[in-house]
Image (cartoon, grey):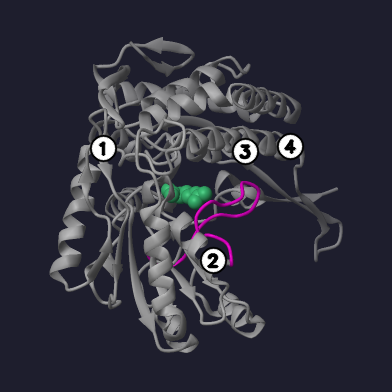
Amino acid sequence: MYKNYIDGQWLDGASAHANVNPSDTTDIIGHYALADAAQAGQASAAAHAAAPRWAASTPQQRADALDKIGTELLARREELGLLLSREEGKTLPEGIGEVTRAGNIFKFFAGEALRQRGDKLASVRPGVEIEVTREPVGVVGIIAPWNFPMAIPAWKIAPALAYGNTVVFKPAELVPGCAWALAEIISRAGLPAGAFNLAMGRGSQVGQAMLDDRRIAGISFTGSVATGGRVAQAAAQRLAKVQLEMGGKNPMVVLNDADLEVAVECAVQSAFFSTGQRCTASSRLIVEEGIYARFVERMQERTAALRIGHALDTGTDIGPVASGDQLEQDLRYLAIGREEGARLVCGGEHVTRATPGFYLTPAIFADCSNDMRICREEIFGPVAAIIPARNYEHALELANDTEFGLASGICSTSLKHVQHFKRHAQAGMVMVNVPTAGVDYHVPFGGRKGSSLGPREQGTFAAEFYTTVKTAYVAG
Ligand code: UN1
């Protein structure tokens, strides 16, 4: 039984549940505690009590702790990558890659703990000096999704601790294994009791308790649009700081002058790798008329050659869908696409393998129109919609015609169009001849419109959410 970690103690939950491998539903990874609202309250109380002490720690203490966590993640990347792939279903290379990313994030923020910023200025009044400094926010509540069980917790927990905040961490119920392993590593990093707390449990219990708890000063959330809206409302009600990363319906524009192989590779990577379960996935492929037929044909060939199988098998390109619920949602959208008159070029079949799992072949819909539901709503599965465009201007218009604004890609060899697209894509991130998914760990991450709310995550920009600014006036 894997327990919650609260105030430096491992505690049984109010109940527990089984962690099931989506590649093989007969494989139970373990039984994990589920906190109720009362235990979530205990975690907030512990984080609240520890906040002054951790805020007063030296930059060296914080850097050392984060560096130690990063070093251990990197040293254990194969073992933890296997755990990640076993519980989430992305392939083993993807799992190992994600643990590596998480390790690097902790290392990056270990450095950030030392690189403090501040300004000393003269006042407009004689004899007065001004200092502008940053302080921790206090207790930060972290609510993470299941699709990046190591990297997303890392990019929230590392800056929270680096800037002197204490943490209540609620992972997604689907992936408690990585959360517990990360918590266990953090528990040995030399933090004071209560500085970091793991509260595994349901959104309706633990998540809600965190939203309602006035001791939690800020909530950083990544997940669905529907839940994000509820988080924002709850935070607004009690004026808590909030950072939301939600969905995407990311376009990838392919122009006539694109290198066809580059475009196909970018599209296949972004749309189908990690089983399409990324908010950065390219789910709308907007293709100019002159290259349209060749693009659809090459996409079909390349997609048909992908091997869908057990996440831990060598040679698997695409692992299973992460859960039965997600598979149902994917299949529902596949039916919607057919009803809307999109042409299914390949895939979209729920297939069987040697072990019972949630296997779905990557699906391509062609001849789509941007107002179809499959082009407007986030599916979060291996489903791509190809939309024809008359010319560059039309492609840009279609790319921006969405409620979302996370990542926007273009494949082209035209400097003129690329420069124009970089400037006019209504998205937080623009990708040129690279996939929209798979971002760096040291630069800002986030979007516009319905994709994000609040300051950016990652890189030095993480300080915007995890610190608060103080302006001090001092007369000598
Ligand atoms: C990536 O594409 O490398 O939930 C990261 C998500 C995003 C992270 C994507 N917040 O898919």
- Mark 1 secondary-structure assignment: loop
Q: Residue at x 64, y 22 (%)?
A: 75
Asked if residue 464 lies in the magenta stretch, the reply is no
> Is residue 207 among what the camera can see?
yes
| Three-letter code, disc 4 | Gly
Q: Nearer the viewer, mark 3 or mark 1?
A: 1
Q: Residue at x 28, y 56 (%)?
A: 379
Query: What SS does tag 2 mark?
Result: helix
Residue 88 position, x and y percent, is 37, 34
| Residue denoted by label 2 | 261
Question: Dots 2 and 4: beta carbons under 8 Å?
Answer: no
Pointers 2 and 3 in contact (CB under 8 A)?
A: no
Secondary element at tag 3: helix
Q: Quadrant of residue 318?
A: top left
Question: Could you tell me the amino acid type at mark 1?
Answer: Ser
- Whole-angstrom CA distance, mark 3 to mark 4, is 10 Å
Q: Residues within 10 Å of mark 3 (few under 14, many from 20)?
A: many
Q: Earlier in the sequence, mark 3 or mark 1?
A: 3
Mark 4 lies on residue: 111
State the extent of the magenta-drawn residues as a range.
433-450
Cα distance, mark 2 to mark 4?
Answer: 39 Å
Q: Tag 2: residue type? A: Glu
Residue at the spot of label 3? 105
Q: Residue at x 16, y 63 (%)?
A: 336
**Extreme residue in the left direction:** 339
Whether 46 is drawn above or below 295: the answer is above
Q: Earlier in the sequence, mark 4 or mark 1?
A: 4
Amino acid, disc 3: Ile
